[in-house]
Image: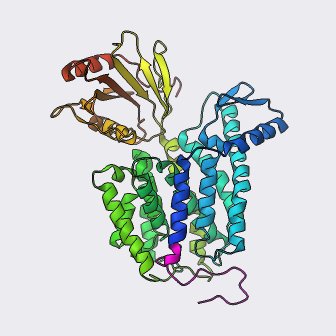
Amino acid sequence: MEPPPSQTVPATPSAGVGSWRLFVPVIVVALLAQLTAAQDFFGAMTKPMVLAVLGVFGFQATESAGMLTVGDLVVPWSRDCAGLNLLVVLLAVTVWMQRHRRLDLGFWLRVAAALPAALAANIARVLTVVAYRVWFFPAVESPQLHYFIGLAWLVPFAMVLVPVDVRGRLVTSLELMHAAAVLALVAPMAEAPGGLALTLAAVLTLAHCRLPACVSPIRWFATVAWLVAAAGIVLTGVESFWLPWLLVCPLLLMRSWILSWEGVILLAGSQPMFQLLPWGQALTWVGLALAGWKLFKGPGAPSQGSSRQLPRLVRLALPLVAASFCLPFLGSTLVTPELANLNPPDTATLREIPGDGYQVHLPGQPEDMGLFWYLPSGSQRHHTLKVCMKYRGIDLRPASENSAVMTDGEVWMREFFLLPQGLVSSHADYVWATLRPGKTSGIHLIAVASCADMTESQFASAAATLVQGLPLPTKPAGR
């Protein structure tokens, strides 16, 4: 039904989310998320602006060799600093929040305004990171806090670009925060195995998230359970469940979607580990095909939107729910203990590698054996060696039955974990040791050697000997 002429902002169309019109923004948002893997061209515009702003505030700043130097502080200039990811997410949010509107001049003007808005938001984000590191020197923000700073600056700029819904600014802010948090989590996953399937699964599920006109008591009880589940994720550190947790928000997710076959499949497909199962990607594509067929089939369920005034209880609860969307970015910093002795020994020769890691050569280490040392990322637990290598395009299998040594046919590999309580040699024991609240995720050690240089038993023995006596992570003195 069309809104009365007195309403200045068009209401959500009565056609449900199953309408074929939704198919275009779903594809656009999915492709925008995939662009985070493209070459970063956005930094050429961002760098001089950041340096100019720092100069205005009296800081002597220079940039060279991929490093931003502010006084005595050196900050690596990464893809995040360049701001392409922020631009992609802001564009995606702008398109997404207007998905039920006509593609008129106002729509395209808002999309075009995303470029200068992203520039301004990214400059503010970089300056916030620099200020944090200056204030807390020599400490560095966690990866989760790093992403949260970007999200915190993205939302106010997105609020300027997105027109206010007829249900009010509070509802618009809630749905915008939800979409921004989901897309901010999806963007870095686009490069992982099954990234395209995961992105489409998450975006199609997000398409079925909308605040209903009437919030039933069952939804309130489910929301309380949903918040308790968030506490469980924070305490246990199973951070791969944050994206499904966001998508299943009881106040927003349509019941008809979660009770459908495609809804269940695609919600499971939004879990990164699901994509690594032998049948995970195939099943996700089956769910995507089924959902795509229903998009073209008909109008689907009616929209849950309404222009009437929200009850007072709902208006009071919405800010709390919106604030909970920040938990995937801040949760691990709330419970992870601060540790020392995380870096390799001073006597080791190091070569830094992407992903918070080092290639290490210890005194007395055999020349035909390598050792990789991966640091913890907040409270996020390390994956198994097989999964870690799967992300790098390498398929491993046990070298023999019940063996801790893995191989791809060309190299031997074995994993260990350094924890404050000692050295752990199996992932099962590691999970058990780190499952309790407040436990650190520790250091992941991976020994590697060529199959041509030694036998499996020789490698297993040499790897175990190599990691003995390494310094364990400890709590700093006085903590």
Relative to 428, does residue 99 appear above or below in the rendering? below
Q: Position of residue 227 (x, y in %)?
A: 46, 59
At horizontal 67% and vertical 67% (from top left) the residue drawn is 162
Report if residue 75 is visible in the image.
yes
- The magenta segment is 1-22
At horizontal 64% and vertical 41% (from top left) the residue drawn is 81
Check residue 5 for magenta coloring.
Answer: yes
Q: Quick one: quadrant of the N terminus? A: bottom right
Report if residue 258 is visible in the image.
no
On the picture, is 198 further left or further right than 11? left
| Quarter of image, res 441 | top left
Q: Nearer the viewer, residue 378 or 364?
A: 364
On the picture, is 332 further left or further right than 138? left
Check residue 299 for magenta coloring.
Answer: no
At horizontal 42% and vertical 62% (from top left) the residue drawn is 201
Q: Nearer the viewer, residue 316 or 229?
A: 229
Q: Position of residue 426 (x, y in %)?
A: 27, 32
- Coloring applied to the structure: rainbow
At horizontal 25% and vertical 31% (from top left) the residue drawn is 409
Q: Position of residue 304 (x, y in %)?
A: 51, 79
Q: How many marks?
A: 0
Relative to 207, does residue 398 appear above or below in the rendering? above
Outermost residue, left direction?
401
Q: Position of residue 6 (x, y in %)?
A: 73, 88
Magenta span dominant secondary structure: loop
